[in-house]
Amino acid sequence: MFESLSERLESAFKQLKGEGRISEINIATTVKEIRRALVDADVNYKIAKEFTDKVKDKALGEKVITAISPGQLMVKIVKDELAELMGNTEVELDLKTTNPTVILIAGLQGSGKTTFSGKLANFLKTKKNKKPLLVAADIYRPAAIDQLKVLGGQIDVDVYSEPENKNAVQIAENAVKEAKAKGYNVVIVDTAGRLAVDEAMMTEVANVKTAVKPQEILFVVDSMTGQDAVNTAKAFNDRLDFSGVVLTKLDGDTRGGAALTIKYTVQKPIKFVSMGEKLDTLDVFYPERMAQRILGMGDITTLVERAQEQFNEEQAKKLEKKIRQNQFDFDDFKEQLQQIKKMGSIKDLLGMIPGVGKAVKDLDISDDAFKGIEAMINSMTPSERANPDLIDGSRRKRIAKGAGKEIQDVNQFMKQFEQMRGMMKMMNKMPGGARGMKTRG
């Protein structure tokens, strides 16, 4: 995400870093380049101008000119201002004031409302220990009810629907009654959208709001539509006074205009960002972390949090014991791959490591990257997986055939696996072994 903007900003900072002496003139030049980068990223010129004026004032006020590392200090100033522009601090959902909490989902057709509703239900169930009820209140799109039921089935969350009823207000009211009667503590109402803002849609969603008095109204918008997304958000906010924004398809947005300016325009926080179709790919929006990623600083905090979500202490102890006894096998390896895959898109994960995002931006890194490895492991017998040393030449041929791979692929994989085991063996010879490494890291 934001590749174009990140490149342009890096280029602007490079000019400053390359100067032997920093002056007011080349600060002004750098700021001008930053403004151009923002405008090219589909940021409104007035907002870009106001942003860079602040950066310039801060730079001169903080004596960037005489700083030991003026280039780095300038990057920090821009990072702080970007975070401020996007809201500065994260804003959580209000889940405490009523029972059940009613969350109304609004937005245009095609923005990803229904998929987001499923992701939000999954987020609340798995991370907030809630019992959510999804409500199919889109009475116009024929597949909307079916889509929501499929999503609900995938995450084991109930879906309330009245397929014959064409009154969205009644459906929402009845769903809230159902939730109260059956002990659901969150109600997520997926409303209808249109291809463009129109009076009928706005009136309907406003009537649903009046009827069920939601604690949260989340406006879902496709970030790839850039400035149009910001304009649509303003139109919805003028009518609905929503409580937060959800940016979808952020993984496909290389410019970032919507993410940067939607908070400034509507004065409502971005609460979530949604990437991909998988139902566990929903992140709370952290302005500071996003600013770091835009400037190529990575996002180690989110990476660690995602790893911790997949971390199983009991499994980790067993794995550590096997590593210390030099018994790490293909079953262990496959288990580690599964945990990495659950953390999200491989390219997205790499982008969270400082300096790596830039290196991999042009590489075609598919989320299917591990499929070939898994196919080779799955083609092994249980005894081969548990005892890698059993795998001789004839077994490798059989594994290659079973996995639909060439013998060279199996040979290369076996070589890499042995190298990894060799490193683990060396680590175990050090004082404290794997545990010692962990405590010293």
Image: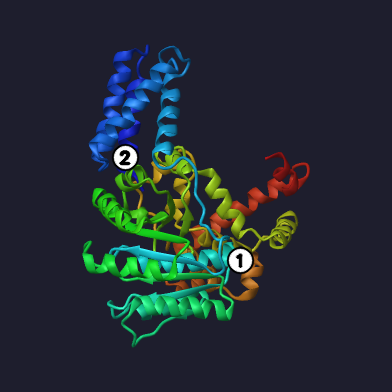
- Which of these two is toward me, 29 or 423? 29
Please tell me which residue is depicted at 46% across the width and 48% down the height of the picture: 350
- Which of these two is toward me, 343 or 187? 187
Q: Position of residue 81 (x, y in %)?
A: 41, 33
Q: Residues within 10 Å of mark 1 (few under 14, many from 20)?
A: few
Residue underneath mark 1: 129
Q: Is residue 383 above or below residue 362?
A: below
Q: Position of residue 384 (x, y in %)?
A: 62, 71
- Which of these two is toward me, 17 or 182? 182
Name the mark nearer the viewer: 2 or 1. 1
Left or right of 316? Residue 160 is left
Q: Quadrant of residue 77?
A: top left
Q: Is residue 69 above or below residue 427?
A: above
Left or right of 349? Residue 51 is left
Q: Using the rendered image of the protein, determine whether residue 296 is visible from the camera's viewpoint.
A: no
Q: Residues within 10 Å of mark 2 (few under 14, many from 20)?
A: many
Q: Position of residue 417 (x, y in %)?
A: 57, 57
Looking at marks 2 and 1 on the same chain, the residue that comes earlier in the sequence is marked by: 2
Q: Amino acid at mark 1?
A: Asn
| Element at label 1 | loop
Q: Residue furthest right?
A: 432
Q: Amino acid at mark 2?
A: Leu
Q: Quadrant of residue 276?
A: bottom left
Q: Using the rendered image of the protein, determine whether residue 305 is visible from the camera's viewpoint.
A: yes
Residue underneath mark 2: 5
Please tell me which residue is depicted at 28% across the width and 65% down the height of the picture: 202
Q: Is residue 32 above or below residue 43?
A: above
- Mark pair 2, 1: CA separation: 38 Å
Q: Residue furthest front?
A: 210
Please tell me which residue is depicted at 72% across the width and 48% down the height of the picture: 434
